[in-house]
Structures are given as C-alpha cells and as structure tokens.
Image (cartoon, helix red, strand yellow):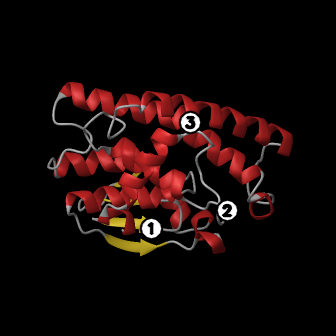
Amino acid sequence: MKLFNSLGPNPQTVRMFAAEKGITLACEEVDVMAGAHRLPPYSALNPMMQTPAFETDQGQIIVEVTAICEYLEELHPHPALIGATPGERAETRMWLRRLDLNILDSRSRAGRATLYRDFYIDKIKLLSVPAAQELQALVEDRILWLDGLMAGRTWICGERFTLADIMFYCFMAYAQEPGQSALPAGAANLGAWFDRVKVRPSTTA
C-alpha cells in the first residue's frame, strides 16, 4: 500500500486515521507547492488533481479521503474508527456528510478566496472576496450549531472517537493565521474537544 502524500488536511486525515489503527503507510511525496499534483504522472492517477491518492497492494488507485479510510477500515477493522455495527457506521457517515457539506468544503473555499487568494488566483476558479466572506460567516454559524450539539459529548459521535473527529480536527487545525483560533468566539464545547484531540499521538502523523 502506498499513500501519495502532501501538505494539507486531506492527506493528514489519512495519516492520522492510519496512525490510530497502528498502520504504517509507505508515502510518496507530491510537491503541491510546485504544482506536481496538476502534472503527469500524478494527474493521470487522480484526474481531480488533488491529494491524496492511495495505491492498494493490487495496484488499484483510490482517491477521496473517506473512501481511502473506508478501505483501511475494511482491512483493519480494529479499533473501529467508522463503526463496529451498522448503526455506528451510519452515525459516523452521517456526521462526515454534515461536516463536509456544512463546514469543511465551505471553509476551504472561503480560505482559498481570501487568505490564500494570491496563491490560488491563477490556478483555480475562486469566489469573489465578498462572496467568500459571506460564506465564511455561514461556516461560523454552522460551527456554533455544532458547538451546541457537543454539550455533554466527549467526541462528535458521543463516546466513540471516529473518522469524524479526525477529519474535523485536521481541517480545523490546518493553516490558521498565527495566534488565531480556527473556532469562532463562544465555541467553548468545541474548544474543549479540540484540546482533547490535539494531545493524541496520532496528530503528529
């Protein structure tokens, strides 16, 4: 198995997931800062030209973080980070979908169009700055919604530490401006959750 690795929260999610399971992944680095993900041979592996990609022992290429992690969970079911029962798996997948649609994708789009606009401007289509700022406000609203639901919970899926926690942590921890929190003011429940996650050894993977 081989992970086509790079900077960014998506590859980190896979690395952290594997570390939680005790899986050692061989990594081949893709220099995204130099644009290697947008050129052959990598662009032939993943036409979306995004990292990571994952090569199985059979030579199959899998892309998209949740698909890669689902594959690893199938091979190494313990500890269960998606779920040990149909109900647990459904709950984790529900939260992954909620996080992606309501927070993570929008946060990434807003960040690319504002904080990192100079880097992305000649590479991909971007929102206008005012539209990105409006989107960021929606993201903050959804984070506060999630914060309210976290009252009394240890992890996003209650007492189960899952891929939902890993993915949310990796995205929220990534590339913040120095000295600034990724969480809006008042998100005390998520602040405590963030502190619980960041002391896990897997966060350094």
Mark 3 neighbour class, 10 Å CA radius: few under 14, some 14 to 19, many 20 or more: many
Disc on res. 143: 3
Q: In the image, what residue type sits under mark 2?
A: Glu
72 relative to 34, above or below: above
Mark positioned earlier in the residue sequence (2 or 3): 3
Give the labeled residue for mark 2.
Answer: 177
Report the front residue among 61 and 191: 191
Give the x, y percent position of residue 56.
28, 59
Give the x, y percent position of residue 159.
25, 37
| Left or right of residue 144, residue 124 in this image | right
Mark 2 neighbour class, 10 Å CA radius: few under 14, some 14 to 19, many 20 or more: few
Q: Quadrant of residue 134?
A: top right
Mark 1 neighbour class, 10 Å CA radius: few under 14, some 14 to 19, many 20 or more: many
Give the x, y percent position of residue 7.
53, 67
150 relative to 194, above or below: above
Residue drawn at (49%, 34%), measured in percent from left and top?
147
Disc on res. 48: none
- Position of the N terminus, as image quadrant, is bottom left
Q: Secondary structure at mark 1?
A: strand
Residue drawn at (43%, 61%), measured in percent from left and top?
12
Q: Quadrant of residue 155?
A: top left
